[in-house]
Image (cartoon, rainbow, N blue to C red):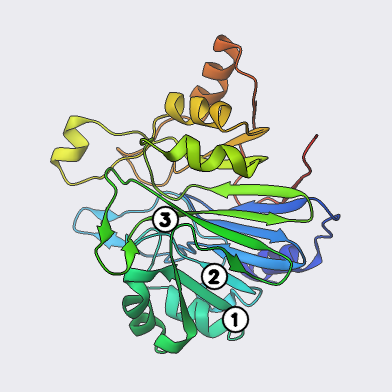
Amino acid sequence: MSAGTSFIESVNVLTVPKGAVGVWWIGQGSLVLKLGGKVIWLDPYLDPEEDRPAGKRRLMPPPCAPEEATSADVILLTHDHRDHIDPASLPQVAAASPEARVYAPAPLRYRVGELIGNVERVEPATAGDAIDLGGIDVIPVPAAHEDLDEHPQYGHKFLGYVLKAEGVTVYCAGDTIPYEGLIETLSPLDVDLAFLPINGRDFFRTRSGTIGNMDYREAAETAVMIGADTFVPVHWGMFAGNTVPPGYAATYVAEKGLDVHVHVPALHRPWVYMPAR
């Protein structure tokens, strides 16, 4: 049995109680969620050989080959950067799960449709317009990476997603920094579990073309301000020069006495979250 087959089997066999969510962090901002009886792949970045002139770029292996991603009921895409909408692996993921519903920010519908060879299969996601997945409500939320980028006709090009099912609420931020209105948008949604980027941003990375996100302090404070029970730091460890130790988030929360749990996930390993409240 290959490592990829083993990973897919772990997704298939995990039993998730009602009111809970099964989680696999598969590197960077990519997640597999088992929620409300469905398997949701968020930004499946599975290209094992993304190379640049200086050599292989990714530092963490994917959990499976793209063609092994047969378990998806839903594919959620946040924005058009290669580690989120992956042109090398997304077509194979979509083919491996042919019944999966595919959602992308509305301005990117045709881009994603060209990648997977069927624009009619891609459903547009628009900030504030809830998506009914049959037992799961998905609310797209604008993301600012590092700025809000809104098409005048189709809306935001960068999104996060809030998922609600069976009494548990999950926020997957995508790539974003804090911005005016984010807390006000999220606070009424009663987020339990928040996946927030922590790699940060700085002058030198921005000058070299690396667009940044929240840092670990901003992510922790955001989690507290939206009332999340548990904060999961993501978007670290994948690329040299654009990462930060996830323990910084836990240390910051402990030193500040912030009222939020921090969970640092093991790569590719399943865990089950159930809200305390």
Q: Residue drawn at (62%, 65%), measured in percent from left and top?
A: 40
Where residue 221 sits in the image (x, y, percent)?
Answer: 50, 25
- Badge 3 marks a residue whose secondary structure is strand
| Vertical position of residue 24 compared to residue 130: above or below | above
Residue at point 24%, 64% (across, down): 152
Identify the residue at image location x=36%, y=36%.
179
For the N terminus, which image quadrant? bottom right
Query: Which residue carries the number 1 mark?
Result: 97
Q: Where residue 117 sits in the image (x, y, percent)?
A: 39, 89
Q: Residues within 10 Å of mark 1 (few under 14, many from 20)?
A: some
> Residue at point 68% right, 40% down?
192
Q: Is residue 131 left or right of residue 20?
A: left
* On-image quarter of the C terminus: top right
Front-lying residue, 269 or 90 = 90
Q: Are marks 3 and 2 in contact (CB under 8 Å)?
A: no
Q: Are marks 1 and 2 in contact (CB under 8 Å)?
A: yes
Which amino acid type is shown beneath numbered disc 2?
Answer: Ile
The residue beneath circle 2 is 75
Q: Are marks 3 and 1 in contact (CB under 8 Å)?
A: no
**Residues packed near mark 2 inside 10 Å, few (<14), some (14 to 19) or many (20 plus):** many
**Label 3 vs 2, first from the N-terminus:** 2
